[in-house]
Structure formats: structure tokens, C-alpha cells
Amino acid sequence: MELEAQGKPTTNIVLLILNCILLFIGNCGGPLIMRLYFIHGGKRVWLSSWLETGGWPIILFLLIITYFHRRAKQGSSSKLFFMKPPLFIASAVIGIITGLDDYLYAYGVARLPVSTTALIIASQLGFTAAFAFLLVKQKFTSYSINAVVLLTIGAGVLALHTSNDRPNGESNKEYFAGFFMTIGASALYGFVLPLVELTYKKAKQAITYSLVMEIQMVMSLFATIFCTIGMLINKDFEAIPREARAFELGETKYYVVIVFSAILWQCFFMGAAGIIFCASSLLSGIVIAVHLPVIEILAVIFYREKFQAEKGVALALSLWGFVSYFYGEIKDNEKKKQNLVETQVPMNIPSP
């Protein structure tokens, strides 16, 4: 079907829920499987960054399916792509920025435990809020401000245990390089989310969910091209077969990790873009931040990382912040409906 959400509240809610699920899968699974690659012998940072957006053909496949469905209903006049040149150029530029962000993030995951990386990335919410205010004039309510503050405090609480998470045998130089690279990734993606929202707003054409998928595909394509250049310079393509044979979990599982990494990260990016389409870049940042304690718990389960009391507190604060934001949205929608009813002009005009 032709996926559109504008003007259809029910469809918009369904799409929002769907994209929240996609983001949850990608944001929780992506870091874990990337860390799995590095823990068991993987060393290629450019390859890991490439995998974050290398799954873009998945979106192309979905677009082709929607095209044939549309063609069956509308005839041969149907278009495969709706994107116009200005929007294509904007998406390509954002894609290159995303490619740089992919590298910064992958470098951090290669040097830091999952729990440490996750809590640093949580600072992204602050950057997203700031850039959303500057780029798209995001309006803040007391509820959204409360959500940002609670989620930021949750990340700060988790920071209390980082000194115990440093990997054995890692030098101070390597640890701090990973730390600052991850902060850079957090700030850069905090800029990308509002930039995507601004692109939607400034596009001189109707933005449908199909077009959102096109935009995300172009962004992922150019991010992948950026990382491909890095892989070529670093000779990563030549090293893949050799690294696969030496992988601690076995050669077959090496390629399974690579494939699932690409799929999970594409879920992340598609979910983030979809939430921006359905709501805002701020909500996308909030949903990403809410997953932080979940990632921490999964790291405890799969990688035997310690679960201190701070992680439980952070989980409670994150859920509180998430509920606060959505409660504020419900109250705001009720207020808008009430104002609309009060300002409606009676249509029954008595005859003279």
C-alpha cells in the first residue's frame, strides 16, 4: 500500500508504534552485536561502521514491493521514486555526515564496554534538544523538559560506575580515545536528527512514509559510500576472509554476525527516521535515551557486565521521563481539541 500518515491520526499512531519497535530492536541489538564482533577477534572499525548503513538494500526491496502494489492499483503511470533533486542532494549530504558518525561510534564500541558506550550516547538527548531548538524551533513544555532532565540524570547516575568498566589490558590512551570518539558520535547524531526533521519541513513536496524510506535509503547509501572509501584505504575488504577464519566463534558465525549487524542497524536508522516523520526529532532522541537501561541490562545478561544499583535507578528515571513526555503529549492534544471546539463557528444560520 502507499504508506501515508499525514492527516490520518490512526495511521500515524500505528506507524509511530511500528517505528518505535524498529528503533527498539536496532538500538538494543545493534551495539550488542557490534561489541560481539570486537570481543571475539574482530578489529576492523571501518567494516563495523560500514555495517551500520550497509543494509540499505532492505529499504530498496520494500520500496519495490510498494511500487508494484501501487502500479497494480494506479497503472503504468506510477513512479518508483518520488524524490526530487533538491531533496536527494540534502539526503546525500546528511548521509555523508552519518557516515562520519558511524565511524566515530564504531571506534568507541571497539574500545569501550557496551554499558559505557550506551551511557555516553545517552548524552545525545541533550544535543538533540539543543539542535532541535535551533534548527526546527522545537517548542518545549514542562513535560518534555522534565523528560529531558530525568533521562539526562539517568545517564549521569550510570556514569558513577564507569571506572569499574575499563577492559583489561587496555591503555589509558586507547580508553580515552574511545571515550571522546563516542562523545563526538553522540553530538553529531544529536545534530543529524533535527537536520532530518528540517529536511522534511523544507522539502518542496509532500512527505509521505514512502518518501521517508527513500530519504533514509539515500542517506544510508551515501554513508555506506563514505565508509567504503575508508575500508578501501584501510584494506578491510582484503582482510575480511582472513579475519573470518581467525574469528573465535568460527568462520560461519563471523558472517552471521556481519549480516545481522547490517539488519539491526538498518532497523535503528529506519525507526529513528520514522519517529521524526510521525512526531519530532526530540521524541526520536527521547526514545533512543529510554533504551539506555535496557541495553545495560542486556549487557549484564550476555556479556556478564556488573549490574549495580545505579542501573536500576537509571531504569526507573528513564521510564519516568518517557511516561512524562507522553503524558504531556496527551494533555497537549486534549487542550488543542478543546480550543478547536471552542473556536468553531456554528454552521446552522437561521433563515430570514
Image (cartoon, rainbow, N blue to C red):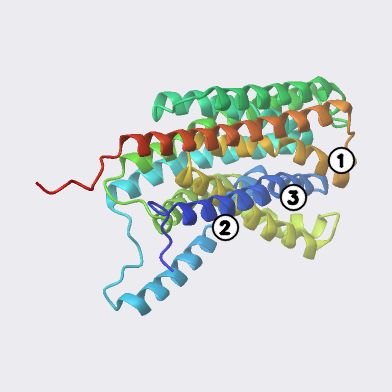
Answer yes or no: is residue 208 visible: yes
Q: Quadrant of residue 172?
A: top right
User: Secondary structure under badge 3?
Assistant: helix
Q: Mark 1 points at which residue?
A: 300
Q: Mark 2 points at which residue?
A: 55
Give the mark toward the camera: 1 or 3.
Answer: 1
Calculate the distance from the C-alpha at mark 2 to the C-alpha at mark 1: 28 Å
Task: Kindly identify which numbered label has been placed on residue 33.
Answer: 3
Looking at the image, residue 13 sits to the left or right of residue 36; the answer is: left
Q: Earlier in the sequence, mark 3 or mark 2?
A: 3
The image shows residue 217, relative to residue 112, as above or below, that is: below
Residue at 56% from the left image edge and 49% from the top image edge: 271
Q: Which of marks 2 and 1 is nearer the N terminus?
A: 2
Looking at the image, residue 134 sits to the left or right of residue 204; the answer is: right
Looking at the image, residue 191 sits to the left or right of residue 207; the answer is: right
Q: Position of residue 140 (x, y in %)?
A: 49, 24
Residue at 52% from the left image edge and 26% from the top image edge: 129
| Dot 2 amino acid type | Gly
Calculate the distance from the C-alpha at mark 1 to the C-alpha at mark 3: 14 Å
| Dot 1 amino acid type | Val
